[in-house]
Amino acid sequence: MTQIVTVQTQPFDGQAPGTSGLRKKVKVFQQANYAENFIQSVFDSVTRDPGATLVIGGDGRFHNRTVIQQVIRMAAANGYGRVLVGRGGILSTPAASHVIRKYTASGGLVLSASHNPGGPDEDFGIKYNIANGGPAPEGVTTAIHARTLEIDRWLTVEADDIDLDRIGDVEVAGMTVSVIDPVADYADLMEELFDFAAIRKAVADGFTMRFDAMSAVTGPYAVEILENRLGFAKGTVVNGTPLEDFGGHHPDPNLIHAKELHDLMMGEDAPDLGAASDGDGDRNLIIGRGRFITPSDSLAMLAANIEIAPAYKGRLAGIARSMPTSAAADRVAEALGVPCFETPTGWKFFGNLLDAGKVTICGEESAGTGSDHVREKDGLWAVLLWLNILAARQIPVDQLAREHWARFGRNYYARHDYEGIAKDGADALMAEIKDSLGVLKGHAFGPLTVKLADSFSYSDPVDGSVSENQGIRVLFEDGSRIVFRLSGTGTQGATLRVYLERYEPADGRLDEETGAMLADQIVAAEAIAGIVEHTGRTAPDVIT
Ligand code: VG1
Ligand code: CO
Protein backbone atom coordinates (compact mmCIF):
# COMPACT_ATOMS: atom_id res chain seq x y z
CA MET A 1 0.00 0.00 0.00
CA THR A 2 1.32 3.40 -0.94
CA GLN A 3 2.23 5.55 2.02
CA ILE A 4 0.60 8.96 1.58
CA VAL A 5 2.37 11.75 3.40
CA THR A 6 0.21 14.58 4.74
CA VAL A 7 2.02 17.88 5.16
CA GLN A 8 0.44 20.53 7.37
CA THR A 9 0.28 23.97 5.81
CA GLN A 10 -1.27 27.43 6.11
CA PRO A 11 -3.76 29.01 3.72
CA PHE A 12 -2.42 31.64 1.33
CA ASP A 13 -3.91 33.94 -1.26
CA GLY A 14 -3.35 32.08 -4.53
CA GLN A 15 -4.16 35.17 -6.59
CA ALA A 16 -7.61 36.30 -7.54
CA PRO A 17 -8.75 34.54 -10.69
CA GLY A 18 -6.77 36.28 -13.42
CA THR A 19 -6.35 35.59 -17.11
CA SER A 20 -3.79 32.80 -16.83
CA GLY A 21 -3.52 30.87 -13.57
CA LEU A 22 -0.99 31.66 -10.87
CA ARG A 23 1.97 33.77 -11.95
CA LYS A 24 4.67 34.93 -9.53
CA LYS A 25 8.40 35.36 -9.16
CA VAL A 26 10.40 32.11 -8.98
CA LYS A 27 11.52 33.12 -5.47
CA VAL A 28 7.88 33.10 -4.38
CA PHE A 29 7.31 29.63 -5.82
CA GLN A 30 10.47 28.42 -4.04
CA GLN A 31 9.03 29.21 -0.61
CA ALA A 32 8.13 26.18 1.48
CA ASN A 33 4.61 24.89 0.70
CA TYR A 34 3.87 27.56 -1.92
CA ALA A 35 3.71 25.59 -5.17
CA GLU A 36 2.42 22.58 -3.24
CA ASN A 37 -0.45 24.63 -1.76
CA PHE A 38 -1.55 25.75 -5.20
CA ILE A 39 -1.24 22.30 -6.76
CA GLN A 40 -3.16 20.74 -3.88
CA SER A 41 -5.82 23.46 -4.19
CA VAL A 42 -6.21 22.44 -7.84
CA PHE A 43 -6.43 18.74 -6.98
CA ASP A 44 -8.96 19.48 -4.21
CA SER A 45 -11.15 21.54 -6.55
CA VAL A 46 -11.31 19.82 -9.93
CA THR A 47 -13.61 16.99 -10.82
CA ARG A 48 -12.14 13.72 -12.04
CA ASP A 49 -12.72 9.98 -11.87
CA PRO A 50 -10.51 7.80 -9.68
CA GLY A 51 -7.45 6.74 -11.64
CA ALA A 52 -7.77 9.70 -14.02
CA THR A 53 -4.96 10.86 -16.31
CA LEU A 54 -3.14 14.15 -15.76
CA VAL A 55 -0.96 15.88 -18.36
CA ILE A 56 2.06 17.89 -17.21
CA GLY A 57 4.16 20.10 -19.39
CA GLY A 58 6.04 23.32 -19.27
CA ASP A 59 7.91 25.83 -21.36
CA GLY A 60 11.31 24.73 -20.02
CA ARG A 61 11.92 27.81 -17.92
CA PHE A 62 13.95 27.81 -14.70
CA HIS A 63 12.22 25.83 -11.91
CA ASN A 64 10.19 23.78 -14.43
CA ARG A 65 11.82 20.44 -13.63
CA THR A 66 11.56 20.96 -9.86
CA VAL A 67 7.84 21.64 -9.93
CA ILE A 68 7.19 18.77 -12.35
CA GLN A 69 8.73 16.31 -9.88
CA GLN A 70 6.60 17.81 -7.09
CA VAL A 71 3.45 17.48 -9.21
CA ILE A 72 4.19 13.84 -10.05
CA ARG A 73 4.50 12.84 -6.38
CA MET A 74 1.42 14.84 -5.42
CA ALA A 75 -0.63 13.39 -8.30
CA ALA A 76 0.23 9.89 -7.05
CA ALA A 77 -0.91 10.83 -3.54
CA ASN A 78 -4.11 12.38 -4.87
CA GLY A 79 -5.34 9.29 -6.68
CA TYR A 80 -4.38 9.92 -10.28
CA GLY A 81 -3.81 6.73 -12.24
CA ARG A 82 -1.51 8.08 -14.90
CA VAL A 83 0.58 11.12 -15.66
CA LEU A 84 1.70 12.08 -19.16
CA VAL A 85 4.70 14.37 -19.20
CA GLY A 86 6.70 15.72 -22.13
CA ARG A 87 10.34 14.65 -22.34
CA GLY A 88 12.58 17.16 -20.60
CA GLY A 89 9.46 18.58 -18.98
CA ILE A 90 8.60 20.24 -22.28
CA LEU A 91 5.13 20.73 -23.72
CA SER A 92 4.05 23.91 -25.42
CA THR A 93 0.68 25.20 -24.25
CA PRO A 94 -1.10 24.20 -27.49
CA ALA A 95 0.66 20.81 -27.53
CA ALA A 96 -0.46 20.22 -23.93
CA SER A 97 -4.00 21.11 -24.98
CA HIS A 98 -3.79 18.56 -27.80
CA VAL A 99 -2.32 15.83 -25.58
CA ILE A 100 -5.11 16.32 -23.00
CA ARG A 101 -7.70 15.88 -25.74
CA LYS A 102 -6.00 13.04 -27.59
CA TYR A 103 -5.44 10.89 -24.50
CA THR A 104 -8.75 11.90 -22.83
CA ALA A 105 -6.99 13.14 -19.75
CA SER A 106 -9.07 14.76 -17.00
CA GLY A 107 -6.91 17.87 -17.27
CA GLY A 108 -3.39 19.17 -17.23
CA LEU A 109 -0.99 21.46 -15.45
CA VAL A 110 0.99 23.75 -17.71
CA LEU A 111 4.01 25.34 -16.09
CA SER A 112 4.74 28.65 -17.72
CA ALA A 113 4.67 32.39 -17.31
CA SER A 114 4.18 32.72 -21.05
CA HIS A 115 6.13 35.65 -22.50
CA ASN A 116 7.44 36.85 -19.12
CA PRO A 117 11.21 36.45 -18.65
CA GLY A 118 12.60 33.35 -16.93
CA GLY A 119 15.47 32.60 -14.52
CA PRO A 120 16.07 32.50 -10.75
CA ASP A 121 15.00 36.14 -10.33
CA GLU A 122 12.26 36.14 -12.94
CA ASP A 123 8.81 34.64 -13.37
CA PHE A 124 7.18 31.24 -13.04
CA GLY A 125 3.58 30.16 -13.35
CA ILE A 126 1.14 27.28 -13.07
CA LYS A 127 -2.15 27.06 -14.95
CA TYR A 128 -4.74 24.31 -15.00
CA ASN A 129 -6.48 23.14 -18.15
CA ILE A 130 -9.68 21.11 -18.09
CA ALA A 131 -10.64 17.96 -20.02
CA ASN A 132 -11.54 19.84 -23.22
CA GLY A 133 -7.90 20.97 -23.33
CA GLY A 134 -8.70 24.59 -22.55
CA PRO A 135 -7.85 26.95 -19.69
CA ALA A 136 -10.01 26.42 -16.63
CA PRO A 137 -13.13 28.60 -16.90
CA GLU A 138 -13.99 31.15 -14.23
CA GLY A 139 -16.08 28.77 -12.15
CA VAL A 140 -13.07 26.48 -11.76
CA THR A 141 -10.45 29.19 -11.16
CA THR A 142 -12.71 30.77 -8.55
CA ALA A 143 -13.04 27.43 -6.76
CA ILE A 144 -9.26 26.91 -6.86
CA HIS A 145 -8.67 30.39 -5.48
CA ALA A 146 -11.22 29.87 -2.72
CA ARG A 147 -9.46 26.64 -1.79
CA THR A 148 -6.07 28.40 -1.47
CA LEU A 149 -7.66 30.59 1.23
CA GLU A 150 -8.63 27.56 3.30
CA ILE A 151 -6.08 24.88 2.63
CA ASP A 152 -4.45 23.29 5.67
CA ARG A 153 -2.62 20.26 4.25
CA TRP A 154 -1.17 18.86 1.07
CA LEU A 155 -0.58 15.28 0.06
CA THR A 156 2.48 13.65 -1.42
CA VAL A 157 4.30 10.32 -1.53
CA GLU A 158 7.88 9.45 -0.79
CA ALA A 159 9.46 8.70 -4.13
CA ASP A 160 12.61 9.58 -6.03
CA ASP A 161 12.63 12.03 -8.92
CA ILE A 162 11.94 10.32 -12.22
CA ASP A 163 14.24 10.60 -15.25
CA LEU A 164 12.41 13.21 -17.33
CA ASP A 165 14.76 12.74 -20.26
CA ARG A 166 13.98 9.12 -21.01
CA ILE A 167 10.87 8.28 -23.03
CA GLY A 168 8.82 5.43 -21.60
CA ASP A 169 6.76 4.39 -18.60
CA VAL A 170 7.86 4.29 -14.98
CA GLU A 171 5.88 3.71 -11.79
CA VAL A 172 5.64 6.15 -8.93
CA ALA A 173 3.83 4.81 -5.87
CA GLY A 174 1.39 2.80 -7.95
CA MET A 175 0.79 5.50 -10.56
CA THR A 176 2.13 5.21 -14.13
CA VAL A 177 4.21 8.09 -15.41
CA SER A 178 4.61 8.13 -19.18
CA VAL A 179 7.36 10.35 -20.53
CA ILE A 180 6.24 11.14 -24.09
CA ASP A 181 7.78 12.79 -27.14
CA PRO A 182 6.52 16.37 -26.73
CA VAL A 183 6.54 17.10 -30.47
CA ALA A 184 5.24 14.05 -32.37
CA ASP A 185 1.51 14.19 -31.58
CA TYR A 186 1.38 17.91 -32.23
CA ALA A 187 3.34 17.74 -35.49
CA ASP A 188 1.04 14.96 -36.73
CA LEU A 189 -2.01 17.09 -35.95
CA MET A 190 -0.58 20.01 -37.95
CA GLU A 191 0.01 17.68 -40.88
CA GLU A 192 -3.66 16.65 -40.77
CA LEU A 193 -4.88 20.26 -40.80
CA PHE A 194 -2.76 21.81 -43.52
CA ASP A 195 -1.68 21.10 -47.07
CA PHE A 196 1.92 20.20 -46.34
CA ALA A 197 2.46 19.13 -49.96
CA ALA A 198 1.54 22.60 -51.22
CA ILE A 199 3.82 24.27 -48.68
CA ARG A 200 6.66 21.85 -49.51
CA LYS A 201 6.24 22.74 -53.18
CA ALA A 202 6.37 26.48 -52.43
CA VAL A 203 9.55 25.90 -50.43
CA ALA A 204 11.06 23.89 -53.30
CA ASP A 205 10.14 26.76 -55.62
CA GLY A 206 12.11 29.19 -53.47
CA PHE A 207 9.77 30.39 -50.69
CA THR A 208 11.87 31.34 -47.66
CA MET A 209 11.18 32.18 -44.05
CA ARG A 210 12.75 32.79 -40.67
CA PHE A 211 11.17 31.53 -37.48
CA ASP A 212 12.47 32.94 -34.19
CA ALA A 213 11.71 30.52 -31.34
CA MET A 214 13.13 33.08 -28.88
CA SER A 215 15.04 30.33 -26.99
CA ALA A 216 11.68 29.16 -25.70
CA VAL A 217 9.47 26.13 -26.10
CA THR A 218 8.64 26.21 -29.83
CA GLY A 219 12.20 25.48 -31.00
CA PRO A 220 11.87 21.67 -31.18
CA TYR A 221 8.39 21.94 -32.69
CA ALA A 222 9.47 24.41 -35.35
CA VAL A 223 12.59 22.46 -36.32
CA GLU A 224 10.57 19.25 -36.72
CA ILE A 225 7.70 20.84 -38.65
CA LEU A 226 9.37 23.58 -40.68
CA GLU A 227 12.78 22.10 -41.38
CA ASN A 228 12.23 18.33 -41.19
CA ARG A 229 8.70 17.95 -42.52
CA LEU A 230 8.28 21.00 -44.77
CA GLY A 231 11.79 21.18 -46.16
CA PHE A 232 12.79 24.70 -45.15
CA ALA A 233 16.58 25.09 -45.08
CA LYS A 234 18.47 24.22 -41.91
CA GLY A 235 18.84 27.42 -39.92
CA THR A 236 15.36 28.68 -40.85
CA VAL A 237 14.54 28.27 -37.15
CA VAL A 238 16.72 30.56 -35.04
CA ASN A 239 17.10 30.49 -31.23
CA GLY A 240 15.66 26.99 -31.48
CA THR A 241 16.96 25.50 -28.24
CA PRO A 242 14.77 26.09 -25.17
CA LEU A 243 16.86 27.77 -22.46
CA GLU A 244 15.93 28.11 -18.78
CA ASP A 245 16.36 31.87 -18.94
CA PHE A 246 15.44 32.33 -22.62
CA GLY A 247 18.95 33.65 -23.16
CA GLY A 248 18.15 36.55 -20.84
CA HIS A 249 15.46 37.90 -23.18
CA HIS A 250 11.71 38.33 -22.93
CA PRO A 251 10.23 35.56 -25.06
CA ASP A 252 7.55 37.98 -26.22
CA PRO A 253 6.96 38.00 -29.97
CA ASN A 254 6.37 41.69 -30.53
CA LEU A 255 8.26 44.38 -32.38
CA ILE A 256 10.28 45.31 -29.31
CA HIS A 257 11.48 41.90 -28.17
CA ALA A 258 11.71 40.43 -31.68
CA LYS A 259 13.37 43.54 -33.04
CA GLU A 260 16.08 41.63 -34.89
CA LEU A 261 13.46 39.73 -36.83
CA HIS A 262 11.59 42.91 -37.57
CA ASP A 263 14.74 44.64 -38.81
CA LEU A 264 15.53 41.69 -41.05
CA MET A 265 12.01 41.73 -42.51
CA MET A 266 12.18 45.46 -43.26
CA GLY A 267 15.60 45.14 -44.95
CA GLU A 268 17.00 44.12 -48.33
CA ASP A 269 17.62 40.50 -47.41
CA ALA A 270 14.18 39.75 -45.99
CA PRO A 271 12.82 36.26 -46.57
CA ASP A 272 9.18 35.88 -47.67
CA LEU A 273 7.87 35.38 -44.14
CA GLY A 274 9.15 36.21 -40.67
CA ALA A 275 7.48 34.65 -37.63
CA ALA A 276 8.07 34.14 -33.93
CA SER A 277 6.36 32.61 -30.92
CA ASP A 278 6.40 33.22 -27.18
CA GLY A 279 7.67 31.38 -24.08
CA ASP A 280 4.98 28.70 -24.06
CA GLY A 281 4.23 28.66 -27.78
CA ASP A 282 0.71 30.02 -27.85
CA ARG A 283 1.40 33.45 -29.35
CA ASN A 284 2.58 34.39 -32.83
CA LEU A 285 4.17 37.26 -34.68
CA ILE A 286 3.71 37.54 -38.44
CA ILE A 287 5.78 39.85 -40.61
CA GLY A 288 5.90 39.77 -44.39
CA ARG A 289 8.69 41.30 -46.42
CA GLY A 290 8.33 44.99 -45.53
CA ARG A 291 4.95 44.46 -43.88
CA PHE A 292 4.08 43.86 -40.22
CA ILE A 293 0.66 42.31 -39.73
CA THR A 294 -1.08 43.35 -36.52
CA PRO A 295 -2.55 40.40 -34.59
CA SER A 296 -6.05 41.83 -35.07
CA ASP A 297 -5.51 42.00 -38.82
CA SER A 298 -3.97 38.55 -38.83
CA LEU A 299 -7.14 37.12 -37.29
CA ALA A 300 -9.25 38.83 -39.94
CA MET A 301 -6.99 37.78 -42.82
CA LEU A 302 -6.75 34.19 -41.63
CA ALA A 303 -10.51 34.00 -41.14
CA ALA A 304 -11.11 35.35 -44.64
CA ASN A 305 -8.85 32.66 -46.12
CA ILE A 306 -9.15 29.76 -43.69
CA GLU A 307 -11.18 27.57 -46.00
CA ILE A 308 -8.10 27.25 -48.20
CA ALA A 309 -6.65 24.87 -45.61
CA PRO A 310 -7.92 21.29 -46.10
CA ALA A 311 -9.24 20.74 -42.56
CA TYR A 312 -11.32 23.92 -42.68
CA LYS A 313 -12.83 23.60 -46.13
CA GLY A 314 -16.53 24.51 -46.08
CA ARG A 315 -16.75 24.67 -42.31
CA LEU A 316 -16.18 28.20 -41.04
CA ALA A 317 -19.01 28.33 -38.50
CA GLY A 318 -18.17 31.64 -36.86
CA ILE A 319 -15.41 33.90 -35.60
CA ALA A 320 -14.69 35.07 -32.06
CA ARG A 321 -12.42 37.85 -30.86
CA SER A 322 -11.64 39.30 -27.46
CA MET A 323 -13.27 42.66 -26.81
CA PRO A 324 -10.09 44.78 -27.13
CA THR A 325 -9.21 43.08 -30.44
CA SER A 326 -10.01 45.29 -33.43
CA ALA A 327 -13.25 44.87 -35.33
CA ALA A 328 -11.40 43.82 -38.51
CA ALA A 329 -12.66 40.25 -37.99
CA ASP A 330 -16.24 41.51 -37.64
CA ARG A 331 -16.12 42.84 -41.21
CA VAL A 332 -14.98 39.47 -42.49
CA ALA A 333 -17.70 37.66 -40.55
CA GLU A 334 -20.29 40.03 -41.95
CA ALA A 335 -19.10 39.59 -45.53
CA LEU A 336 -18.97 35.81 -45.20
CA GLY A 337 -22.33 35.64 -43.45
CA VAL A 338 -21.10 33.98 -40.25
CA PRO A 339 -21.56 35.19 -36.67
CA CYS A 340 -18.85 37.09 -34.80
CA PHE A 341 -18.63 36.85 -31.00
CA GLU A 342 -17.00 39.44 -28.73
CA THR A 343 -15.63 37.89 -25.53
CA PRO A 344 -13.62 39.18 -22.56
CA THR A 345 -9.82 38.97 -22.69
CA GLY A 346 -8.40 35.50 -22.08
CA TRP A 347 -8.62 32.29 -24.08
CA LYS A 348 -10.86 30.57 -21.52
CA PHE A 349 -13.80 32.57 -22.84
CA PHE A 350 -13.53 30.90 -26.26
CA GLY A 351 -13.82 27.37 -24.82
CA ASN A 352 -17.61 27.09 -24.72
CA LEU A 353 -18.04 28.65 -28.17
CA LEU A 354 -15.53 26.19 -29.65
CA ASP A 355 -17.02 23.19 -27.82
CA ALA A 356 -20.50 24.14 -29.04
CA GLY A 357 -19.28 24.43 -32.63
CA LYS A 358 -20.34 28.07 -32.80
CA VAL A 359 -16.93 29.33 -33.87
CA THR A 360 -14.07 27.82 -35.85
CA ILE A 361 -11.38 30.48 -35.47
CA CYS A 362 -10.68 32.93 -32.65
CA GLY A 363 -8.10 35.51 -31.77
CA GLU A 364 -6.82 38.21 -29.48
CA GLU A 365 -4.99 41.45 -30.17
CA SER A 366 -2.19 40.18 -27.93
CA ALA A 367 -0.82 37.94 -30.69
CA GLY A 368 -3.02 34.95 -30.04
CA THR A 369 -4.81 33.09 -32.81
CA GLY A 370 -6.25 29.60 -32.81
CA SER A 371 -9.06 27.32 -33.90
CA ASP A 372 -11.18 24.38 -32.84
CA HIS A 373 -8.23 21.97 -33.34
CA VAL A 374 -7.23 22.54 -29.69
CA ARG A 375 -8.57 24.77 -26.90
CA GLU A 376 -5.64 27.16 -26.62
CA LYS A 377 -4.23 29.80 -28.88
CA ASP A 378 -1.54 28.28 -31.03
CA GLY A 379 1.51 30.11 -32.34
CA LEU A 380 2.83 27.57 -34.83
CA TRP A 381 -0.65 26.78 -36.06
CA ALA A 382 -1.09 30.43 -37.05
CA VAL A 383 2.26 30.40 -38.86
CA LEU A 384 1.31 27.21 -40.72
CA LEU A 385 -2.08 28.61 -41.72
CA TRP A 386 -0.33 31.69 -43.10
CA LEU A 387 2.08 29.41 -44.97
CA ASN A 388 -0.77 27.32 -46.37
CA ILE A 389 -2.62 30.43 -47.56
CA LEU A 390 0.49 32.04 -49.08
CA ALA A 391 1.43 28.78 -50.82
CA ALA A 392 -2.06 28.47 -52.30
CA ARG A 393 -2.56 32.09 -53.29
CA GLN A 394 1.03 32.62 -54.40
CA ILE A 395 1.15 36.27 -53.40
CA PRO A 396 3.41 38.09 -50.92
CA VAL A 397 2.12 38.96 -47.44
CA ASP A 398 2.04 42.67 -48.30
CA GLN A 399 -0.17 42.12 -51.32
CA LEU A 400 -2.51 39.89 -49.35
CA ALA A 401 -2.86 42.63 -46.73
CA ARG A 402 -3.52 45.33 -49.32
CA GLU A 403 -6.12 43.25 -51.11
CA HIS A 404 -7.77 42.51 -47.77
CA TRP A 405 -8.03 46.19 -46.84
CA ALA A 406 -9.24 47.11 -50.31
CA ARG A 407 -12.13 44.70 -49.76
CA PHE A 408 -12.95 45.11 -46.05
CA GLY A 409 -11.40 48.45 -45.08
CA ARG A 410 -8.58 48.84 -42.57
CA ASN A 411 -8.67 48.99 -38.77
CA TYR A 412 -5.64 51.01 -37.65
CA TYR A 413 -4.73 49.69 -34.24
CA ALA A 414 -2.27 50.13 -31.37
CA ARG A 415 -1.99 49.10 -27.73
CA HIS A 416 -0.22 51.31 -25.19
CA ASP A 417 1.01 49.55 -22.04
CA TYR A 418 1.98 51.28 -18.80
CA GLU A 419 3.80 48.55 -16.90
CA GLY A 420 4.63 48.15 -13.21
CA ILE A 421 2.65 51.20 -12.14
CA ALA A 422 1.34 51.65 -8.58
CA LYS A 423 -1.77 49.58 -8.02
CA ASP A 424 -3.59 52.36 -6.19
CA GLY A 425 -3.15 54.79 -9.06
CA ALA A 426 -4.28 52.19 -11.58
CA ASP A 427 -7.37 51.32 -9.55
CA ALA A 428 -8.21 55.00 -9.07
CA LEU A 429 -7.89 55.64 -12.79
CA MET A 430 -10.31 52.85 -13.64
CA ALA A 431 -12.73 53.83 -10.85
CA GLU A 432 -12.81 57.44 -12.01
CA ILE A 433 -13.56 56.54 -15.62
CA LYS A 434 -16.28 54.19 -14.42
CA ASP A 435 -17.82 56.99 -12.38
CA SER A 436 -17.81 59.30 -15.39
CA LEU A 437 -19.36 56.82 -17.85
CA GLY A 438 -22.75 58.48 -17.52
CA VAL A 439 -21.53 61.91 -18.58
CA LEU A 440 -19.13 60.80 -21.33
CA LYS A 441 -21.87 60.16 -23.86
CA GLY A 442 -22.16 63.06 -26.32
CA HIS A 443 -18.97 64.64 -24.99
CA ALA A 444 -16.51 65.82 -27.65
CA PHE A 445 -12.75 65.30 -27.48
CA GLY A 446 -11.36 67.29 -30.36
CA PRO A 447 -13.00 65.86 -33.48
CA LEU A 448 -14.20 62.75 -31.62
CA THR A 449 -17.66 62.61 -30.07
CA VAL A 450 -18.49 59.80 -27.66
CA LYS A 451 -21.29 57.58 -28.91
CA LEU A 452 -21.24 55.02 -26.13
CA ALA A 453 -19.18 54.37 -23.03
CA ASP A 454 -19.58 51.31 -20.83
CA SER A 455 -17.92 48.72 -18.68
CA PHE A 456 -17.85 45.53 -20.74
CA SER A 457 -19.91 42.68 -19.40
CA TYR A 458 -20.13 39.31 -21.13
CA SER A 459 -22.89 36.81 -20.96
CA ASP A 460 -21.74 33.43 -22.25
CA PRO A 461 -24.17 32.34 -24.99
CA VAL A 462 -23.61 28.68 -24.15
CA ASP A 463 -23.85 28.41 -20.35
CA GLY A 464 -25.29 31.84 -19.53
CA SER A 465 -22.52 32.71 -17.06
CA VAL A 466 -21.90 36.44 -16.71
CA SER A 467 -18.47 38.10 -16.42
CA GLU A 468 -18.55 41.75 -15.43
CA ASN A 469 -15.95 44.51 -15.36
CA GLN A 470 -13.99 43.22 -18.35
CA GLY A 471 -12.64 46.61 -19.39
CA ILE A 472 -14.02 50.03 -20.27
CA ARG A 473 -15.05 50.78 -23.84
CA VAL A 474 -15.42 54.25 -25.27
CA LEU A 475 -16.89 54.22 -28.77
CA PHE A 476 -16.93 57.35 -30.91
CA GLU A 477 -19.35 58.53 -33.57
CA ASP A 478 -16.77 58.03 -36.34
CA GLY A 479 -16.40 54.34 -35.51
CA SER A 480 -13.11 54.69 -33.67
CA ARG A 481 -12.68 53.31 -30.16
CA ILE A 482 -10.60 53.41 -26.98
CA VAL A 483 -10.53 50.58 -24.43
CA PHE A 484 -9.02 50.78 -20.95
CA ARG A 485 -8.15 47.61 -19.05
CA LEU A 486 -5.88 46.43 -16.25
CA SER A 487 -3.74 43.38 -16.99
CA GLY A 488 -4.45 40.15 -15.15
CA THR A 489 -1.07 38.55 -15.86
CA GLY A 490 1.53 40.98 -14.48
CA THR A 491 3.69 39.97 -11.54
CA GLN A 492 4.70 43.43 -10.31
CA GLY A 493 2.38 46.33 -9.46
CA ALA A 494 -0.31 46.94 -12.06
CA THR A 495 -0.27 47.25 -15.83
CA LEU A 496 -2.65 49.58 -17.61
CA ARG A 497 -3.48 48.73 -21.21
CA VAL A 498 -4.97 51.36 -23.49
CA TYR A 499 -6.24 49.97 -26.81
CA LEU A 500 -6.74 52.42 -29.68
CA GLU A 501 -8.57 51.76 -32.91
CA ARG A 502 -9.78 53.64 -35.95
CA TYR A 503 -11.58 52.29 -38.98
CA GLU A 504 -10.97 53.46 -42.54
CA PRO A 505 -13.42 52.14 -45.16
CA ALA A 506 -12.28 50.31 -48.28
CA ASP A 507 -12.25 53.55 -50.26
CA GLY A 508 -10.55 55.49 -47.44
CA ARG A 509 -6.93 56.14 -46.44
CA LEU A 510 -5.46 52.65 -46.44
CA ASP A 511 -1.75 53.34 -46.58
CA GLU A 512 -0.99 55.64 -43.66
CA GLU A 513 1.27 55.42 -40.66
CA THR A 514 -0.59 53.95 -37.65
CA GLY A 515 0.66 56.40 -34.99
CA ALA A 516 -0.41 59.41 -37.05
CA MET A 517 -3.81 57.91 -37.78
CA LEU A 518 -4.44 57.39 -34.06
CA ALA A 519 -3.28 60.84 -32.88
CA ASP A 520 -6.78 62.08 -31.97
CA GLN A 521 -7.56 58.89 -30.07
CA ILE A 522 -4.31 59.20 -28.09
CA VAL A 523 -5.19 62.75 -27.02
CA ALA A 524 -8.73 61.67 -26.11
CA ALA A 525 -7.44 58.75 -24.03
CA GLU A 526 -5.39 61.12 -21.89
CA ALA A 527 -8.32 63.52 -21.51
CA ILE A 528 -10.68 60.73 -20.47
CA ALA A 529 -8.38 58.83 -18.11
CA GLY A 530 -5.81 61.30 -16.79
CA ILE A 531 -3.08 58.75 -17.47
CA VAL A 532 -0.16 61.06 -16.65
CA GLU A 533 -1.66 62.10 -13.34
CA HIS A 534 -2.61 58.59 -12.22
CA THR A 535 0.44 56.67 -13.41
CA GLY A 536 3.15 59.31 -13.18
CA ARG A 537 4.18 58.31 -16.71
CA THR A 538 4.28 60.67 -19.65
CA ALA A 539 4.56 57.90 -22.24
CA PRO A 540 3.70 54.20 -22.47
CA ASP A 541 6.44 51.64 -21.75
CA VAL A 542 5.47 49.47 -24.67
CA ILE A 543 3.51 50.19 -27.83
CA THR A 544 2.37 47.19 -29.83
C1 VG1 B 1 -2.56 39.06 -21.61
C2 VG1 B 1 -3.24 39.35 -22.93
C3 VG1 B 1 -4.40 38.38 -23.15
C4 VG1 B 1 -3.88 36.95 -23.06
C5 VG1 B 1 -3.17 36.74 -21.74
C6 VG1 B 1 -2.53 35.39 -21.65
O1 VG1 B 1 -3.47 39.23 -20.56
O2 VG1 B 1 -3.71 40.67 -22.97
O3 VG1 B 1 -4.98 38.65 -24.40
O4 VG1 B 1 -4.95 36.05 -23.16
O5 VG1 B 1 -2.13 37.71 -21.60
O6 VG1 B 1 -1.64 35.17 -22.69
P1 VG1 B 1 -3.51 40.57 -19.66
O7 VG1 B 1 -4.53 40.31 -18.63
O8 VG1 B 1 -2.12 40.76 -19.13
O9 VG1 B 1 -3.87 41.69 -20.60
V1 VG1 B 1 -0.34 34.11 -22.53
O10 VG1 B 1 0.47 34.06 -23.95
O11 VG1 B 1 0.29 34.63 -21.16
O12 VG1 B 1 -1.07 32.59 -22.11
CO1 CO C 1 1.85 32.51 -24.01
Image (cartoon, rainbow, N blue to C red):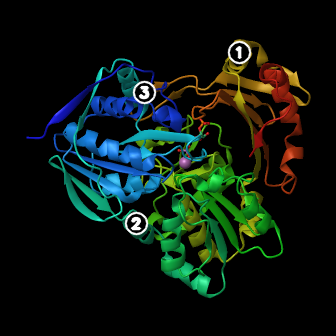
Question: What's the amino acid at mark 3?
Answer: Ser
Q: Quote the CA–CA distance across marks 2 and 1.
A: 47 Å
Disc number lying in front (3 or 2): 2
Name the disc covering residue 465, or none.
Answer: 3
Above or below, 356 against 497 in this view is below
Name the disc covering residue 139, or none.
Answer: none
The local secondary structure at tag 3 comes to: loop
* Residue 336, image quadrant: bottom right
Residue under pointer 2 = 189
Q: Is residue 146 left or right of residue 343?
A: left
Which residue extends farthest left? 1
The local secondary structure at tag 2 comes to: helix
Question: What's the amino acid at mark 1?
Answer: Ala
Could you tell which of marks 3 and 2 lies nearer the N-terminus? 2
Question: What's the amino acid at mark 2?
Answer: Leu
Q: Quote the CA–CA distance across marks 3 and 2.
A: 32 Å
- Across and down, in percent, residue 392 comes to 59, 76
Q: Quote the CA–CA distance across marks 1 and 3.
A: 28 Å
